[in-house]
Image: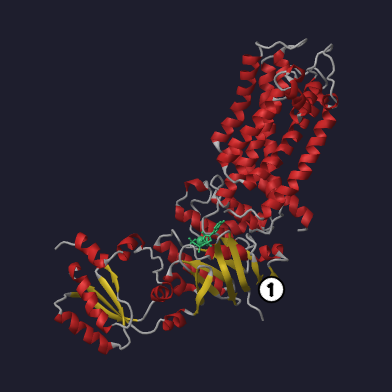
Amino acid sequence: MTATISATGLVKRYGEVTALDGLDLSVPEGTVLGLLGPNGAGKTTAVSILTTLLEPDEGQATIAGVDLRTRPDEVRRRIGLSGQYAAVDEVLTGYENLDMIGRLYHLGKARSKTRSRELLERFDLVDAGDRPVKTYSGGMRRRLDLAGALVAEPPVLFLDEPTTGLDPRSRIDLWAVIRELVAKGSTLLLTTQYMEEADQLADEIVVIDHGTAIARGTSDQLKSQVGGDRIDVSIDDADQLGRARAVLERVAVGDVEVDAPVRRLLAPISGGAGTLTTALRALDDAGIAISDVGLRRPTLDDVFLTLTGRRAEHEETSEDDAGRESDPRESTSSGAPS
Amino acid sequence: MNAVTAVFADTSVIAKRNVIKIVRVPEVMVFVLMSPIMFVLLFGYVFGNAIAVEGTSYREFLIAGIFAQSVMFGATFTGAGIAEDMQKGIMDRFRSLPMSRSAVLAGRTISDVVYNLLSLIIMAITGLAVGWRIRGSFLEAILGFVLLLVFAYAVSWVMAYIALLVPSVEVINNASFMVIFPLTFIANTFVPAEDLPGPLKTFAEWNPVSSVTQAARELFGNIPPGVPAPDVWSLQHPIIYTMIWVVITIAVFAPLSVNRYKRANRR
Ligand SMILES: Nc1ncnc2c1ncn2[C@@H]1O[C@H](COP(=O)(O)OP(=O)(O)OP(=O)(O)O)[C@@H](O)[C@H]1O
Ligand SMILES: [Mg+2]
């Protein structure tokens, strides 16, 4: 049996830029695929193609057994889309937005009305439901947009960065909604820049960069690709970051990563607890005071870093990207009290 | 729901949404109400006293021209609305729904007929208040208004196509001014076509804005007896000539626009 979402060799070029470069995707019925990639990786392009908004230059795809190229109208009956940017009408009320979508899915007047009210409740928008959307916060718009994708209860859902811009509570609420949908049998393709989100929701993860898949598997499979454990050390004195790095480099099997603003170092090792003891002794000998230390399994974040040479975006740390990329010795000498 | 009922149902959903947007946005509503009044008063009084047209009051001569110009500008609304929906990503949402592929544009152009109808009613009332009179039969006058609306409807499809090509509200506004101003001025809207110099005269005589204006003038009974008949076919048969333009414009631009809509990805 073919997968509910199945795409092979998708290519999309924009002049010089190759947005998708031979992407294959396959999502079995009732599962969640997490499409993970940095800015410009081609996530939105892939979603646009699979939702009939954009025609690929090359490649084939079927959605719920329907060919995308020859029967796009039939595909549209089976899908729900929530794009990267909330596409809601500001002048209409939340209810009117949903009801309009329901009518355009041809649900019929009564059904469209009930569904719209149900969804307003589900997404915690009952109080705001009869207010124009221009009075909504960004998070409320986002939730309304997601509700729009669910009006017709389509069997296949595409959510492009559904939780970007949501606060942590709304994000967790939305994860619950998504789990519920999948439990009822929906098939879902979800793009995200958040490792945690993919980790939480996706049955399978495809990491893409520059329009091609650079890794795929379950979260555990991907983590094991990156190999062993990591020593995670935080130190007291920012001036010692350079020295601490040099010490750790002697026990590490790969590059030691330094997160200067939080005075934290991350060293991949092959040995386990024994190596940790060695490392701690060496740090102590060098006179470096440690505030926190641990041995941990690699996260998807580490997978991403290993595969692309870049960290995936993280909401808590996205603001100090600049600090992380500059040389830790330079950034600390100016910033830390001595 | 079969394909034909779907077209009608979807078009009415979209048209209803657009009309809600006209009525609910105060800025738009003020524009709908004020600009026709302004047009009639401004042109009527500024030009109305300055230029003499044989055998009739110039103000009466002007009204049909002002109507034609206003509904042309009303058609710009189509372009601006489409550009806005594209920019806000709402067009992508529509395009991902299993709705009729022509409904978004059909609904848009139809809601702009509503917009133009409102502005025609207000202009007519203002015109009557400043001395304009319908001197023909009531039915002919209705036909005159319908012809103006049908003409604007055709122009809406041109605007729709431009907006799908260049989805920017600013560009649409500029482009439409650059097209609509010359089209509505090099015509018999404000001065009789025969008074224009050389090539402008020929352009004005065959300009469909002239023919729709001429037709409206005739149907409103605003051409006094004794005025010599125009000597070009287009203005001798203004209703037929206008309808030829309307049919050709819609036949060309409606399919072009729908086709463009199908691939109108946001970026
Ligand atoms: N219409 C377009 N014209 C030119 N280039 C485009 C167009 N659309 C996308 N691209 C390019 O294609 C590449 C992939 O873009 P896409 O929007 O799919 O990335 P993404 O993974 O969704 O990124 P983000 O996380 O920022 O949303 C980028 O390099 C982008 O600049
Ligand atoms: Mg994107």
Q: Is residue A192 above or below residue A116?
A: below
- Percent x, y for residue B103? 70, 50
A229 vs B83, left or right, is left
- Percent x, y for residue A250? 25, 82
Q: Is residue A205 visible?
A: no
- Percent x, y for residue A209? 49, 69
Q: Is residue A304 above or below residue B224?
A: below
Which quarter of the image is occupied by the C terminus of chain B? Answer: bottom right
- Percent x, y for residue A148? 57, 58
Using the image as rendered, state which of residue B263 and residue B101 is in the foreground. B263
A104 vs B203, left or right, is left
Using the image as rendered, state which of residue B59 and residue A150 is in the foreground. B59
Q: Chain of mark 1?
A: A
Q: Is residue B176 visible?
A: yes
Label 1: few (<14), some (14–19) or many (≥20) C-alpha neighbours in 10 Å: some
Using the image as rendered, state which of residue A311 and residue B61 is in the foreground. A311
Q: Is residue A91 above or below residue A12?
A: above
Query: How many numbered discs, if any?
Result: 1
Using the image as rendered, state which of residue B3 and residue B201 is in the foreground. B201
Which quarter of the image is occupied by the N terminus of chain B? Answer: bottom right
Residue at 54%, 73% (x, y): give it.
Answer: A32
B143 vs A74, left or right, is right
Q: Is residue B219 above or below residue A25?
A: above
Q: Which residue is mark 1?
A: A65
Mark 1 belongs to which amino acid? Gly
B56 vs B168, left or right, is right
Residue at 59%, 74% (x, y): give it.
Answer: A24
